[in-house]
Image (tube, coloured by chain):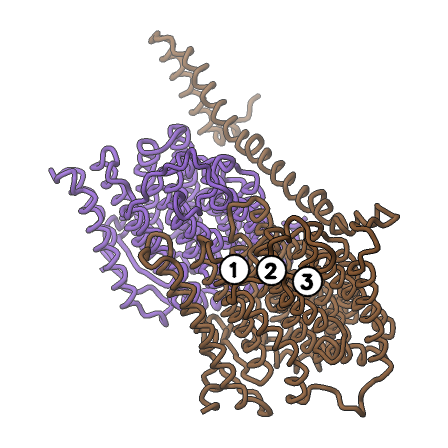
Amino acid sequence: MTQFFAENFWLVPCYPLIGVLITLLWSPGMIRRTGPRPAGYVNLLTTFLALLHGTLAFPAAWGQPPLYLDIPWLQVAGLDLTIPLEISALTIGATTLVTGMNFLAQIYAVGYLEMDWGWARFFAFLSLFEAGICSLALCNSLFFSFMVLEILTLGTYLLVGFWLNQSLVVTGARDAFLTKRIGDLFLLMGVLALYPLSGTWNFSELAQWAKTAELQPTVAALLGLGLIAGPMGKCAQFPLHLWLDEAMEGPAPSTILRNSVVVATGAWVLIKLEPVLALSPVVSAVTIAIGAATAIGSALISIAQVDIKRALSYTVSAYMGMIFIAVGTQHTEAALLLILSHALAQGLLVMSTGSVILNAITQDLTDLGGLWSRRPISGICYLVGVAGLVGLPPLGGFWALLKLADGLWASHPWLVGVLLLVNGLTAFSMMREFGLIFAGQPKEMTERSPENAWLVTLPMMGLMGFTLHLPLILQSLSLLPSWASFNTDVALLLLFSSLLGCGAGAIVYIDQKIPKPIQLPWGGLQDFFANDLYTPKLYRSSIVFGVDWTSRIADWFDRFIIDGAVNLVGAVSLLGGEALKYGNSGRGQFYVLTIALSSVAIAIAMSWSFLSQLSLP
Amino acid sequence: MLSTLIWFPILGAIAIGFLPLPVARLKLITLTITGAVLLWTLWLMHQFDFNNPLFQFQEYIPWLEPLGLNYDLGVDGLSLPLLVLNSFLTWIAVYSSSEETPRPRLFYALILLVSGAVAGAFLAHNLLLFFLFYEVELIPFFLLIAIWGGENRGYAATKFLIYTAVSGALILAGFLGLIWSTGASSFAYESLAGQTLPLGLQILLLGVLLLGFGVKIPLVPLHTWLPDTYVAASSPVVILLGGVLAKLGAYGMLRFGLGLFPEAWVTLGPGLATWATVSVLYGATVAIAQKDIKRMVAYSSIGHMGYILLGAASLTALSLVGAVAQMVAHGLILAILFHLVGVVEAKVGTRELDVLNGLMNPIRGLPLVSALLVLSGMASAGIPGLVGFIAEFLVFQGSYSVFPLQTLLCVVGSGLTAVYFVILLNRTCFGRLDNAIAYFPKVEWRERVPALILAIIILFLGIQPTWLVRWSESTTTATVAAILPISTEQVAVQKIIQQ
C-alpha cells in the first residue's frame, strides 16, 4: 500500500494545484452566495491530502534506493527536456515538511485573516507556493528547478503584494520581485552556460560529470558565480537581502511559510548544485564569504530592529548564511539538517509573534511589553522556538549546528568561530525580542491582549510540539551522532555561546533595571544596523539611479535624435515642396524651356560614352 | 485549399463593403467569416504533416508567365504557425471591436481585406506575389489608423504609410536586383533559392532586404513609426498591427533573407546578433522611461522582436525553432496586452501611469482585467509556465553556443522587461483606488472573452510547449542542416566588416 503512494508521489504537487484551480471559482464576480470562505477550506483539504500522501509514502521510501520517474515534456531540435523526479526519503521528507507547514499556516490563516476581503486569493497563493516548493523538492533537474524558482518569484510578488492598498506593501512587492529576479537571471545565465559544458541538467548526472570535468578556472568560476546568484536572491543574502525585510509587510500567515520553507528553496538548489560549485575554489570561497558576511551582518541588524517581524526576518538571512557556509565547505548533510530545524523553529517564532501582532495591533517592539502573564502560551511557544533555533540541547538547532561545526572544526576553524558568533548574536537578538514583548510592565497597546482564538493558537501549539519532538524524530531516523563520534569540545562551545547570548539578552531586556530603549554610545553604529547597513540608500544611488537615468537618456535620444532625424527629413521635404511651388509661374514658355533644357541634359548624359570618344582638336 | 484563406476574407470584404447587409449584423457576419477562416486554418493544421520540412498543399496557377509572376502558394513549418496566428488574431480583433464602431461597413471590410492579404503574403511562394500581397495591406492599414485612431492619428498614419512604402520599395529593389543579377526568368522561390552569386553581391542584396524588413519588424533605429502608430491605433487594429503585421517583417526576413542568401546571412551573423542585442536592450531601456502604458507596451514590442533576430542570426536548429516560437508567443502576448490596455483606457479614461491606481480592487476596480494584465505582463517578462518563457529560452539556449556575449546581454534585456512591467503593474493594478473617480463602466463580455481566450492559450502553450514548436521543428532543422559550413572567404569578409 505504502509502495503505491511512493510510486505515485508525483501527485503531491498536483493536489494544491487542483486547490488553486477550484479557488478560481471564487474570483470576484463568480461565486458570491457562499462568501469566500469555502475557497479556504478547499485549499486546506487539498493540502491535507498532500500531507497525508507524503506521510503514507514515507515508510516505503525509508532505507530504500531512490525511485526515479521521468515525465516527458518537450523534445525539440536535439534538446530533451524531460522532467526527472527523484522520489527518495529525503525528497518525501522535504515535501512532508512543506505540506505540514502549509497545513498549519492555513489553519492559522483561517483565524488570522478572519475579516479579510482577499481570502480566496490568499489561500490560492499559499497553495501555489506549496505546489511550487513540493515540485522543486521532487524535481531532479536544474532547468526545472529554475522554472519553479521563477514561478515562485512571481508568487512572492503576488503574496507580498496581497494587501495591495498600502504603499509600503506595493514597494515591498516590487523590490521582492526585482531582487529575486536579478538573482534568477544570473541563475539563468548559469543554466544556459552549463548545458553546453555538461550536456545535462540532471542533478545526479551533474554530480557525476563534476567528478571528471576539467574546466578552465575562469569558466568554472563564472559559471559557479552565476549559479549561486539565484540562491543568493532566494535566501536573502548580501547584497540581495533587502527584499525579505520589506516582504514582512505581507500578512503573517504567509510569513510563516516564507521564513521557514520558501527561503529554503534557494538553499535546496544550492545544496543540489554543490558538486558543480566545488569545481572552482573561487566559487567556494565566495559562497563562504557571502554566507559569513550575511550571517554576522544580519544577526547584528536583527538586534537593532524595532519591528517584530523585521527582527525575525534578519535571523532568517543569518541562518541561510550559515547554510551558504555549509555548502561552500561541502557539508551538505549539515545544511539539510539546518534547513529542517530552522524551518520548524522559525515557523514557530513567526506564529507566536504573529499572534501577538494580531490583537496587540502593533508590531513595534517599543510599544509592547508585559505580555507574559496575559499570554503564557504565546510566550512558551516563543521560548521553544528560540531554543529550537539556536544551539540549545536537546532541540533540533543544536544538532544541526553541531554537525556543521563538527565538520568545520578540523578544516576551517575560523568558520566555527563565525558560527558560534552568529549563534550567540541570534540568541541575544531573540531574547531581546522576547524581553521587549513579554517582560516588563504592560503598555498601552498590550493592556488588553489575551490569547487568540483556537484557530491561531492550536496550530502554534502543534508546531511547538513538532519542534520539541524533532530530536526524537531525528533519533528514530538515526540522524543524530552516536556518542562515539560526539565532539564534546564543539558541543560545549556551542552550548556556551547559546547560553551567553540568551543570558546577556535576558539580563539586558528581561531584567528591568536597564532603561529602554537602549542607546549605544556609538549612535552612528546603531543607526548603521538599524537602517539595514544603509542598503536601501545604496540601491537607490547605484542600481536604481543608473537604470532610471539610462532609460531617461535613451528615451530622450529616441525622441529627439532618432525620431527628430525622421521628422527633420519630413519637414525638409515639406518645406522643399512649399518653396518649389513658387517656381510654378504658369507661363508656358518657362515650362517649354525647362523641358527643352532637361531633354538636352538627358541626351548628353545618355550619349556621353559616344561623345567622349570624339577627339576635339 | 490555401486559396480559401486568402479569397474568402477578401470576398467577405467585398460583400460587407458593397452588399446592403444590415448594419447591426455586420460584426456578427464578420465574426462568422473570420471564424470560418479560423476553423479552416485549424483544419489545415490538423492535415499538416509536421515531419515534412517542405512546402505542403501547394497550389499553382500560371498567371503572367513572361513577367515570372505566377499564382504559387505553399505552406511549410515557418508559415503555418504565423498563418494560424493571423486567422486567430483577426478573429480576436473582430470580437473585441466595439458594437458602436463608426462606419462599421468600411471598418470590417478593411479588416477582412487585411487578413486576406496577410495570409496571402505568408502563403506566397513567388517573390513578386509576396510583394503584391505585402503592399495590398498598406492602404487598408493606413485607413484603419487614420479613421478609427486616437489623437494624433493623422501624423501616425502618414508616418506608418511612408515608412511601410519605403520598406516595400526596398524589398522590391532587393527582389529585382536578385532577378537581374541571377538572370532568372521567374520570381519563383525555388528557382532563386539555389542562387550562386558572388558573396559581395549577396551581402549587398541581403542588406537591402534587411533594411526593408527591418522597418517592418521593426529594428532599432528603423522603429520610430511603431510607438506613434501603436499608440494612435485603436485596440483591434493594434492587435493586428503588433500581432500579425510585425511578424510579416520577421517572416520575410527569415524566408527571403535567410532562405535566399544563406551564405551572406552566415557571414553577417555576428553583426545581426549584435543588432538584435541593441534592439532588445534599447527597446527595454526606453520602455522603462515611458509614462503612457500603451507606449510602454509598444516599446516592449521592439525589444521582444530582437529575440527573433538573435535566434535567426545564431542559426542553430534550436535557436531557429525558438525564433519561430517567439514570433507566435510575441503575437499572442502583444495582442492580450494591447487589448487589456485598451480596456483600461476605455474604462478609466486614461493611459497615464501617474494617474492610474489600484485597479485590482475587487469591488470597484477592474479585478479580472488587472489579474489578466498581471498574467500577460509576466508572460512578456518571461516567467516560466507562460508561453513567453519557453520561446525565449529556446532562443537563448540555441544562441548561447554561437554568440555567448550577445545572448547574455539579451538575458539582461529580459531582466529589464521585468522592471518596466513591474512599474506598469504596480502603478496600474496595485495601490489604493481613488474612490472619487472609481465609477468605471462595467467591463463587457466582448472585452473579457478575447482576453480570457488569449490568456488560456498563453498558459496552455507555456505548459505544453510541444504544441508550439512541433509545427516548425522539421522545417527549421532542415533549413539549418542545408547551411554549408562557413568558408574561408566568408571568414575573410567577416574580418573586413569588423574592421
**Is disc 1 in the same subunit as disc 2?**
yes
In which image quadrant can residue B5 be found?
Answer: bottom left
For the residues marked 2 and 3, what is the alpha-carbon distance in whole angstroms? 15 Å
Residue A297 in view, yes or no: yes
Quadrant where the N terminus of chain A sits is bottom left
Which residue is denoted by mark 1 in the rendering? Answer: A112
Please report the residue visible at 73 percent of the width from the left and 59 percent of the height from the top.
Answer: A439
Q: What's under tag 2, amino acid-wise?
A: Gly
Residue at the disc numbered 3: A372
2 or 3: tag closer to the N-terminus: 2
Residue at the spot of label 2? A354
Dot placed on the residue nearer the N-terminal end, 1 or 3: 1
Q: Give, as a three-letter code, the residue at label 3.
A: Trp
Return the chain for callout 3: A
Q: Colour of chain A?
A: brown
Residue B219 x, y percent position in the rendering:
51, 45
